[in-house]
Amino acid sequence: MKFEVKKPPRIFEVGDRNKITIADCAELDLEPNEQVTFKTASGAEYDVTRKEWGYYATPSTNGRLKRFGWRTALVKNPRGQYYVFLMEPGKQAEFDAYLKEEGLSVVKWLDDDKELATL
């Protein structure tokens, strides 16, 4: 694993309707079969694992992430671009507000077995 802090961080804006400033703070290079775990202040965890063919971008959406309390959604923006969002436990109101502010829509909840069965 190689970790490099960006000093100063690269600053840029995102958002179609409300500009949000993002600080790109670091780079992390993983070797195959290495994993990093991101933790929130509330203790929620999210893992990314490097494989020789690419990445496991998330743990199982309807298994491990769901057990940790995360909601996983396939989200679409007004330009037809798709994203995978992970909603932190207890943050539904903030999530809904963000979707509304940016004109985003949930295409499919990827942690719901019934919705996944329709794919």
Image (cartoon, helix red, strand yellow):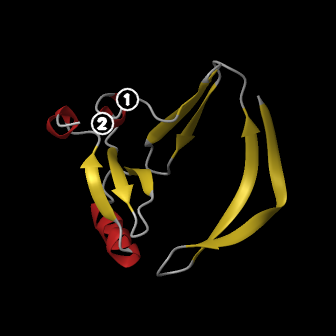
Task: Name the kind of residue labelled 2 in the image.
Answer: Lys
In the image, farthest residue toward the left: 114
Residue tagged by mark 2? 66
Q: Quadrant of the N terminus?
A: top right
- Rate crowding at label 2 as few (under 14), some (14 to 19) or many (20 or more) other CA atoms within 10 Å: some
In the image, farthest residue toward the right: 7
Task: Compute the Cα span from label 1 to label 2.
Answer: 8 Å
- Left or right position of 81 against 104: right
Residue tagged by mark 1? 60
* Place of residue 77 in the rendered image (x, y in percent of width and height, measured from the top left): 40, 65
**Residue at image location 72% in from the left, 23% down from the top:** 31
Q: Compared with residue 77, is residue 68 higher up or lower down, i.e. above or below?
A: above
Q: Nearer the viewer, residue 76 or 112?
A: 76
Q: Quadrant of residue 82?
A: bottom left
- Left or right position of 7 against 103: right
Q: In which quarter of the image is residue 14?
A: bottom right
Determine the secondary structure under disc 2.
Answer: helix
Instruction: State which tag comes first along the sequence, 1 or 2.
Output: 1
Determine the secondary structure under disc 1.
Answer: loop
Q: Which of 67 and 116 is in front in this view?
A: 116
Q: Compared with residue 108, is residue 81 higher up or lower down, i.e. above or below?
A: below
